[in-house]
Every structure is written in structure tokens, then in C-alpha cells.
Image (cartoon, helix red, strand yellow):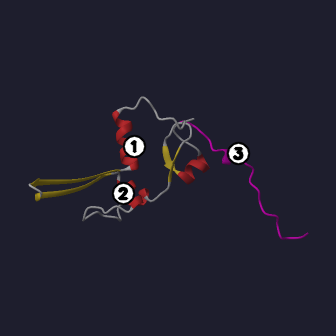
Amino acid sequence: MMGLAPNKTSNLADVVERILDKGLVINADIAVSIAGTELLGIKIRATLASFETAAKYGLELPSGTNLNAPGWKEASVTKMACPECGNRRDEKLLIQEGCHVCGWSSPMQSLPLIRPPSDSYD
């Protein structure tokens, strides 16, 4: 099971995955002044995030982005990480079917199905 403590051994792939998953925003204001008079002012706003994260936070996407593409439909599906291996999968499928990577099965699968009583009287 994954703990809450930060992982001490991270490789570049883990760092890039975390940045794309959470997003990274860089704001920089650069001003060149001589004797109190601003000669040059530059404002930089840069965002680095996956399209899924950008859509989730409502970030403005580049013009010409096709929002009807199949990838956007998948981005709108809520994903959840498997408690055993961390594989991200559709939340409903993970709860119903379990994880196809490590074989983890949801406790919901072992619960008995309770059916409402029948309204017919014999």
C-alpha cells in the first residue's frame, strides 16, 4: 500500500508524471530600469500540464484544439489509482472489475447483491 510519506527515490519519469498530473505554473516579471525609469518590462506566464489537468482546471487551450477528439472524452472520465500498484484506471471500472495489471480486486466485488423484495403476493 502506498504511504503518505514522500518517495525518496524518484527518477525523471516520476517527476515528469507528477508535474503533468498536478500542473506547473511559472509567473515571471522582468523589468529593466535606469535611474528609476523603466525601459523594458516583460511579463511571462507559462503553464505546463497534461491536457487532462488543463481541462480539469479550466486552463485556456491553444486555438484550434479539437475538443471533440476521442482523447478529450477519456479525459473527462474520473480516474483512480489502484491501491496496490498505482495504475490509473476509470474509477467505476476499478471498483467493479478490479485492477487488470496487478490483480487487485475491490472489496465491493465480494459483497452480496441485495435485491429489493418482490411486490407480488402469492
Instruction: Pinpoint residue 44: horizontal percent, then vertical percent.
Output: 22, 55
Q: CA distance from mark 3 to mark 1?
A: 33 Å
Question: Taking 118 as reference, is 41 left or right?
Answer: left
Specify whether residue 118 is painted magenta.
yes
| Amino acid on which the number 2 mark rests in the picture | Ala
Marking on residue 18: 1
Query: In terms of depth relative to the viewer, which is nearer, 99 or 51?
Result: 51
Residue 95 point in image, percent of width and height: 60, 49
Identify residue for label 3: 110
- Toward the viewer: 46 or 102? 46
Q: Nearer the viewer, mark 3 or mark 1?
A: 1
* Callout 1 amino acid: Arg
Residue at the (44%, 59%) spot, across then down: 76
Residue at 36% of width from left, 57% of height from top? 54
- Type of amino acid at the residue the image marks with label 3: Ser
* Magenta stretch in the rendered image: 102-122
Residue 23 picture location, percent across and down: 36, 50
